[in-house]
Amino acid sequence: MKYVLVLLDGGGDRPDANGNTPLSLANKPNIDMLAANGMVGLLDIGYGKDVDSDFGFFTILGYAKDEYPGRGYLEALGANLQPKDDAICIRGNFATLDGNGVLIDRRAGRDNTGLESLVEAVDGMEIDGITFRIVKSAGHRVVMVLEDRRLTDGVLSNDPRVVNVPLPEVKPKDDAGKFTASLLNKFVRKAHQVLQKHAVNAKRECPANVILIRSVGKKRPVQSFQERFGLTGCCIAGIPIADGVARYLGMDVIKLPGSTGYPDTNWDAKVAAAITALGKYDLVWLHINALDILAHDKKRVEKTAYVKKIDDGIGRIIKAAGKDTAYILVPDHKTVSLPDFGKYEHVADPVPVCISGPGIKPNGVGKYDEQSAERGFKLEKHALLGFVLSLARHGGQ
Ligand SMILES: [Zn+2]
C-alpha cells in the first residue's frame, strides 16, 4: 500500500452565521468521492497555548510530545544548517523597541524590507567565545545556531506575547540554564545596539531593532519514520519548517522551484512531483500552505476557492496513482478567516480528517468538513498514522 498525506495547513475553519466553512462550501468532487468511500472523523492534536504548525506536523506524523525537539532545532534543519548534536538552535523574531526599551511590535510590522542586511550585520557576532550563526527564515523570523558544551536549551523565551511592556530578560529554567540565559541576554543587548544604528532601520517605518528569543531547541535522539512505521517517506512542501520536520524524522525532502508556501505556489509542479514520488516512496507527504495564508489575510472567499484548486490536483494524483493507494486529508490546525473568532489566527480545535483507500470501509459520515466530521471517529494526539496503517493492513483486503 502507498499513502498520500495531504496536509492542508490551516485548512480547517470556524463556521459563519449560516454554519458554513470554506471546506463545507468548496466545490471539491474528488475530496467528496474520497469521503463518500472512506472514513471521516476528528483529530485532537492536543496543542497547549501555542498552536504551531511544526508541532502539528510532528504529531500528525505519529510522534509524541516528549519526542519534540523544539521549533528552533526544526527551523535550523529546515534552513539546512546541519547543527551539530550538542548545538542549541533558536527561533527568533525581528521586533521593535522604542527609545525606552518598550516592546512596541513583536514582528517589526511584518515588514521584510532590508532584513537580509540586518541579519548580515549580526551574523557571526561573538560573545563569551561563542559564535552566533544566524540566518533569515520565513518573513520576520530568524534561526540561530550556537555550538558550545556549556549551552543548554533550559531557558525561557523573552517574548512577553503582548506589546507596550518593557522587554523581559531571557530566564533560565534551572541552574544549568544560567550561562545560556546570560549569554542570550548579552546577545539581545549587543544586537540591539548594532541594529539600532543600521542604515536599513532609518528607512523602515517599524525598525527591526531587536531580536526576540522565541524558542530554544536541541537535538533529541528520535526513531526515524521508517524505523517506526516501516515506510519510506518524502516531503513536498513550500515552507522550510515542514522540510525541517521531515529531515528530523529521516524523510527525504523534495525541493521544487516556484514552491513558495503562498497561494502563488507552483501547485501543478507539486502535484506532478507527488505522482513521481509515489513510484519511489511508500508515503508522500504533500504539504499545502496557501489556505493558512489566505485565512491570516482575511480572504475567506479565496480560501474556499483554493480548496477547488487542491481538489483538482488530488484528482490528478488519484488518476495517476495505483489502486493500492490510500489518502489521508488533514489540516494541522484551523486558521480562522472570520473576524469574530480567533482574530484570523490559529485555533486549537480538533481538525477534520478523511482516510480513504482500498480496504478502508466507509463509516457513514460521507462528507469532509468540520461539522460532518463530528459524526465520525475521534482520535487524539499522535494516533492518526497508526490508526490509518491498522485500517489499511487489516481493513478486510
Ligand atoms: Zn499550520
Image (cartoon, grey):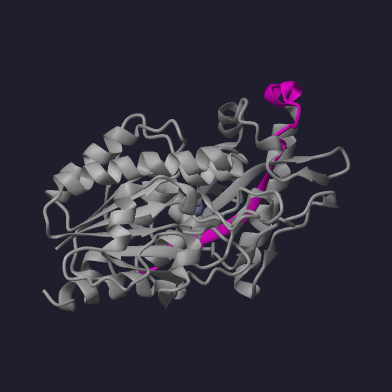
- Left/right placement of residue 96 relative to residue 323 reads right
Q: Which of 177 and 270 is in front in this view?
A: 270
Q: Which of 395 and 207 is in front in this view?
A: 395
Q: Say which residue appears at 61% left-offset and 25% top-offset.
A: 114
- Residue 165 spot, x, y in % from top left: 84, 52
Q: Quadrant of residue 139?
A: top right
- Left/right placement of residue 15 relative to residue 328 reads right
- Residue 54 spot, x, y in % from top left: 47, 57
Q: Say which residue appears at 28% left-offset and 58% top-offset.
A: 34
Q: Can residue 241 be seen in this view?
A: yes
Q: Residue furthest right?
A: 100
Quadrant assignment for the N terminus = bottom left
- Left/right placement of residue 45 relative to residue 330 reads right
- Total numbered labels: 0
Q: Quadrant of residue 51?
A: bottom right
Q: Say which residue appears at 56% left-offset and 66% top-offset.
A: 349
Q: Quadrant of residue 363?
A: bottom left
Q: Can residue 133 be seen in this view?
A: no
Q: Which of 221 and 263 is in front in this view?
A: 263
- Residue 75 spot, x, y in % from top left: 46, 50
**Magenta residue check for 220:** yes
**Magenta residue check for 23:** no
- Residue 247 spot, x, y in % from top left: 32, 54
- Left/right placement of residue 3 relative to residue 262 reads left
Quadrant assignment for the C terminus = bottom left
Which stretch appears magenta? 198-221
